[in-house]
Amino acid sequence: MIVRPRPGSDDHIVRIDGDEQSAAEHLLAWGWTDGLPIVVPTVARVEQMCAGAIHGPGEVLGNIAPRGAPLTLQHLAANAVMAGCLPEYMPVLEAAVAAMQEGMFNLFGMQTTTHPCALLVIVHGEIADRIGMNSGAGCFGPGNRANATIGRALNLIVRNVGGGRPGEADRATLGAPSKYTLCFAEDESDPDWEPLSVARGCAPGASAVTLFQGHGPEAFVDQKTRTAEGLACSFGLSLVKIGHPRLVQSARAVVVLSPEHYAIFREAGWDRRRIERALYEATIRPGAELVSGLDGVGEGVPAARAGETVPKFHDDGIMVVRAGGRAGLFSAILPGWLAGRNRAELQPVTKEVRE
């Protein structure tokens, strides 16, 4: 028997004849997977996963958009099993599913847009180290179980409980690999660095998770600039291209600073707030260069703004996080969903992890 990984009736147990391979093939045929091989969520495995959770097995953790179906802890555990999670990941998953249901996160819109945005997950604090997450070399890539499976479990929940399936409720024109998983830990090894979670209101030392509506990553390469001012300007040249060079105040971005790029800012005495402000200012451009119709390009700002200086982002639209390997002047930009014209209606969300 396996636990049914989505609601639909009071009976969440489905009996399947045959071995686990047969069960896995049934789940794939029913559309309950992301196309990759899964771990069959047997009753014993789901119970073991629930044992690592803060909530009780029968508790409802909310309603998952776009379908609005209730998510029980057992549903969460079943999807975590399928993704390959370990029970000790459950507190992170519980915090993340709470974050995705915040109104300002707009999970419904994110799951039904034609834009390729997905759930991007950043884990902060002691729990990231304890469960073995990667904040260093290759943290966006393969090889780390926690990074890979936490993000995958959340995307399976949106698919199986929320109904966000490609071509159905999920209307993304192309989608993105990040709809499988994009989850990593913040590098908090420098005691002088203010972690993103603290900047977003969490207590110093607290474990937390930040969810961001975006896709990516896009590589940022600057191997020659050695001043903080020049590096901020260099980042600006890449940041203005998000979505389209003439689209403004529509998206947010996460800038992932590698250790070598961060060292340039650190040696200049720049803290988080100064870096983020400098990146914002580096994306302000003359409106005359952004006018719709210029060079035959329809995208852009109205002609009435030609005399303005126009920022690419709202003044809180760039978040900086540290991660990556110790060698290489390579950082990354995680572009956000192009639906943020009213920034009060679309925000990343950070939640402390309860244990």
Image (cartoon, helix red, strand yellow):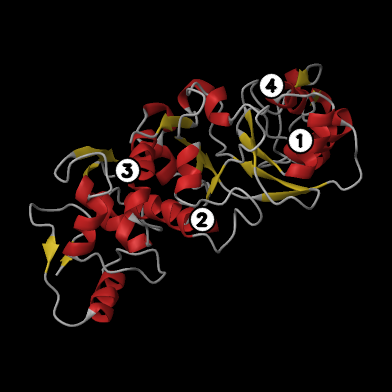
Which residue type does callout 4 highlight? Arg
Classify residue 120 as left or right of residue 35: right
Proximity of marks 3 and 4: CB atoms separated by less than 8 Å: no
Q: For the residues marked 3 and 4, what is the alpha-carbon distance in whole angstroms?
A: 35 Å
Residue occupied by mark 1:
293
The label shown at residue 66 is 3
| Label 1, residues with CA under 10 Å away: few <14, some 14-19, many ≥20 | few
Residue 51, relative to residue 355: is it above or below? below
Residue occupied by mark 2:
175
Residue 286, position in %: x, y? 83, 24
First in sequence: mark 2 vs mark 1: 2
Q: For the residues marked 2 and 4, what is the alpha-carbon distance in whole angstroms?
A: 33 Å
Residue occupied by mark 4:
273
First in sequence: mark 3 vs mark 4: 3
**Number of numbered discs overlaid on the protein picture:** 4
First in sequence: mark 2 vs mark 3: 3
Which residue type does callout 2 highlight? Gly
Q: Nearer the viewer, mark 2 or mark 4?
A: 4
Q: For the residues marked 4 and 1, what is the alpha-carbon distance in whole angstroms?
A: 36 Å
Q: For the residues marked 2 and 1, what is the alpha-carbon distance in whole angstroms?
A: 29 Å
Q: Nearer the viewer, mark 3 or mark 4?
A: 4
Residue at point 84%, 26% (across, down): 268
